[in-house]
Image (cartoon, grey):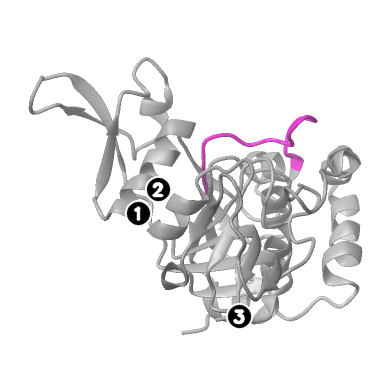
C-alpha cells in the first residue's frame, strides 16, 4: 500500500507504542521521525541499535518515555544533549533507558523475526550491563553446561526504515551499508518504509536487501527522507548539519526555536489521541 507519509504515521504509530526507526550510517528515517513529532505522538518506547540525532530530536520533543538501545551519540561530534537533559533533568519528560550491546540488540531483533521468545549469546559476561539491565539473564547450555546470556525477543509494534526504492506493489529495495533493517522489519507487527522513489520495476543492485510486500504494511515516498544522513546512490551525508545540531541541542530555547522553524513550520498541531 502506497500512502502519504503523514497518513502512514497517523495510521501505524500510536501513543504508547514500541517504535523502532532503524538505519545504520545511512538510510536513517529522519523524515518519519519528524512526522511523529508533528503529530504529537508521545509515551513511546523508542528502540534502535544506534540512536543518533533524530532520536535526540524526538526525545527533546517529548515523544519518548523509554529508550532501548546499544549506543547513543551524535556520530563524529559528541553527545546527544536532549537525551542527556531527559536523563539528568527529566526535561521535557523523564526518560527510562534499557541498555544492551550491539550484539544483544541484533540478536533480540533476530529472535523476534524468527518467532522465538529469546536469543542466546556469549556477550555481556564480564560487563556491568548485566547488573544494570533486567532483560539480560544468564542461562546454562543444556548440551555443554556453558554459562551464556539470554535476551528477550524484540517485537516492535511498528518498525520504520528508509530505503532507496519500492515498486508500486510495495516491494522494497535497499542497498549499501545496512544494519538490522531486515530483522527489525520482520520482527514488527507493522512496518512502514519510506523511500526515495516509487518505481514501476525494481532493477537488481549488487548487495541489495529486498523486503517483499507481504512483510511491509505501507510505503511512503519521501525524497530526501534520510537527510542529514545519506542514501547510497542518491545523496551524501551533510556533515555540517551534525555539527550544527550540537550547538542547537545544548540549549533548550535554541532547540524549541529549531522545532518551530524546522519541524512544525510555525504551526504546531494539537496533540492527537491514539488511533484504534
Residue 61 can be seen in this image: yes
Relative to 124, say whether 73 is above or below. Answer: below
Any mark on residue 109, and which? Answer: 2
> Would you say residue 76 sits in the magenta stretch?
yes
- Give residue 140's position: percent from left, percent from top: 15, 26
Sequence-wise first label, 2 or 3: 3
Displayed quadrant of residue 52: top right
Label 1, secondary structure: give it. helix
Circle 2 crowding by C-alpha within 10 Å: few under 14, some 14–19, many from 20: many
Characterize the local packing of mark 1: few (<14), some (14-19) or many (20 or more) Cα atoms within 10 angstroms. Answer: some
Q: Position of residue 83 (x, y in %)?
A: 68, 43
Disc 2/disc 1 C-alpha distance (Å): 6 Å
Q: For the residues labelled 2 and 1, say whether their Cβ atoms are less than 8 Å apart.
A: yes
The overriding secondary structure of the stretch rendered in magenta is loop
Tell me the tag on residue 113. Answer: 1
Q: Which residues are magenta?
A: 67-81
Res 46 seen here: no
Q: Which residue is mark 3?
A: 2
Where residue 244 sits, quadrant-wise, is top right
Horizontal and vertical percent for residue 247?
A: 89, 40
Residue shown at the point (65%, 73%) measured from the top left: 220
- Single out the residue that lies furthest toward the bottom: 276
Residue depicted at 72% across the width and 53% down the height: 60
Amino acid at each position: 500500500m502506497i500512502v502519504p507519509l503523514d497518513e502512514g504515521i497517523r495510521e501505524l504509530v500510536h501513543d504508547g507504542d514500541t517504535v523502532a526507526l532503524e538505519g545504520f550510517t545511512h538510510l536513517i528515517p529522519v523524515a518519519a521521525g519528524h512526522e511523529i513529532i508533528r503529530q504529537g505522538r508521545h509515551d513511546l518506547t523508542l528502540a534502535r541499535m544506534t540512536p543518533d540525532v533524530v532520536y535526540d530530536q524526538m526525545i527533546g520533543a517529548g515523544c519518548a518515555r523509554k529508550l532501548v538501545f546499544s549506543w547513543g551519540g551524535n556520530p563524529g561530534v559528541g553527545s546527544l544533549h536532549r537525551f542527556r537533559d531527559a536523563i539528568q533533568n527529566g526535561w521535557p519528560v523523564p526518560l527510562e533507558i534499557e541498555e544492551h550491546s550491539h550484539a544483544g540488540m541484533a540478536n533480540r531483533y533476530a529472535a523476534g523475526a524468527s518467532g522465538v521468545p529469546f536469543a542466546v549469546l556469549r556477550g555481556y559476561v564480564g560487563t556491568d550491563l548485566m547488573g544494570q539491565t533486567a532483560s539480560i539473564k544468564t542461562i546454562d547450555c543444556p548440551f555443554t553446561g556453558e554459562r551464556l546470556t539470554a535476551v528477550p525477543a524484540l517485537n516492535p509494534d511498528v518498525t520504520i526504515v528508509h530505503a532507496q526504492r519500492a515498486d508500486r506493489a510495495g516491494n522494497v529495495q535497499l542497498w549499501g551499508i545496512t544494519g538490522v533493517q531486515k530483522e527489525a522489519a520482520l520482527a514488527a507487527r507493522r512496518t512502514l518504509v519510506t523511500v526515495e522513489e516509487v518505481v514501476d520495476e525494481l532493477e537488481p543492485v549488487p548487495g541489495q536487501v529486498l523486503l517483499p510486500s507481504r512483510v511491509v504494511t505501507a510505503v511512503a515516498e519521501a525524497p530526501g527522507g534520510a537527510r542529514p544522513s545519506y542514501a547510497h546512490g542518491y545523496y551524501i551525508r551533510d556533515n555540517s548539519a551534525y555539527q550544527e545540531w550540537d550547538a542547537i541541542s545544548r540549549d533548550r530555547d535554541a532547540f524549541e526555536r529549531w522545532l518551530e522553524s524546522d519541524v512544525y513550520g510555525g504551526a504546531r498541531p494539537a496533540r492527537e489521541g491514539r488511533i484504534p
